């Protein structure tokens, strides 16, 4: 694809653009007296790694109506998004969890995404994309897209024959630009 015509990159929000998990783990540990680390979360489906009471607590955190109001994004993420916007159309895509939709939407807008480039849906496969960046492997199944699995403790099983697995934003910028040039 020529860079004269911008390709479309669909990029996940939770776990990719912003990492809410460390905050949740800290709150679970404080509330339950546990000592979880990020690496203990080995499944995207939290009910598979947390006891029911802790899972319910986590889900209550997820549905807080101000969840995204005070979140910050790492500088390397912001830099990468700016670079990719120079050669691609970025579409922020995220699941709409009841309770925090307003907070999430406003957070994404503050990152510079226009209303036309924000999609809140559980069915991310409804979007056509040249490139997909996601931490949930079930969202990286479109054979027409170049898939980048954003490395997390719950996706270590990702087979790189299906696309690279990385959390290095400089590498992601390089991979996406090279792919859109080819």
Image (tube, rainbow, N blue to C red):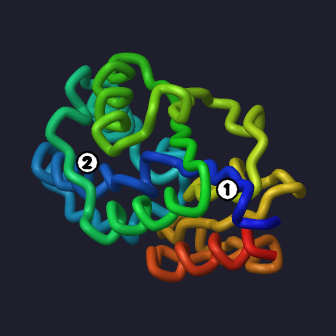
In the figure, 27 relative to 103: above or below? Answer: below
Q: Which mark is residue 132?
A: 1
- Report the side of 5 relative to 25 (left or right): right
Q: Secondary structure at mark 1?
A: strand
Name the residue located 32 percent from the left edge and 40 percent from the top edge.
54
Secondary structure under badge 2?
helix
Residue 50, position as x, y percentages in the image: 41, 48
Single out the residue that lies furthest toward the front: 4
Q: Is residue 24 visible?
A: yes
Q: Dividing the image into 4 quarters, which one contains the C terminus? A: bottom right
State the image quarter where residue 17 is shown: bottom left
Quadrant for the N terminus in the image? bottom right
Is 67 on the left or on the right of 170, as rendered? left
Which x, y percent locates residue 151? 52, 71
- Image-quadrant location for residue 147: bottom right
* Residue furthest right as drawn: 143
What residue did someone put label 2 on?
24
Residue 53 visible in the displayed image: no
- Marks 1 and 2 sit apart, C-alpha to C-alpha, by 26 Å
Task: Say which mark, if any, is on residue 13.
Answer: none
Compared with 66, 40 (above or below) is below
Please tell me in which quadrant of the rendered image residue 159 appears: bottom right
Please rate how many residues cluster around mark 1, counting C-alpha atoms within 10 Å: few if below 14, some from 14 to 19, many from 20: many
Q: Which residue: 57% across, 80% down?
A: 174
Identify which residue, 32 or 76, lies in the foreground.
Answer: 76
Give the mark toward the camera: 1 or 2: 1
Q: Residue at x 33, y 19 (%)?
A: 102
- Disc with the residue nearer the chain's start (1 vs 2): 2
């Amino acid at each position: 694809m020529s860079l004269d015509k911008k390709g479309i990159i669909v990029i996940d929000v939770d776990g990719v653009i912003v990492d809410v998990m460390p905050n949740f783990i800290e709150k679970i540990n404080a509330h339950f007296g546990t000592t979880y680390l990020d690496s203990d979360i080995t499944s995207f489906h939290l009910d598979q790694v947390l006891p029911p009471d802790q899972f319910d607590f986590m889900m209550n955190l997820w549905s807080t109506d101000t969840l995204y109001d005070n979140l910050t994004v790492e500088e390397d993420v912001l830099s990468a998004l700016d670079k990719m916007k120079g050669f691609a159309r970025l579409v922020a895509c995220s699941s709409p969890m009841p309770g925090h939709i307003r907070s999430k939407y406003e957070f994404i807008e503050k990152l510079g995404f226009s209303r036309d480039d924000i999609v809140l849906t559980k069915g991310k496969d409804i979007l056509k994309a040249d490139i997909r960046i996601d931490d949930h492997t079930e969202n990286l199944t479109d054979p027409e897209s170049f898939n980048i699995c954003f490395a997390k403790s719950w996706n270590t099983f990702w087979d790189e024959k299906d696309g690279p697995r990385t959390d290095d934003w400089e590498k992601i910028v390089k991979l996406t630009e090279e792919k859109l040039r080819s």
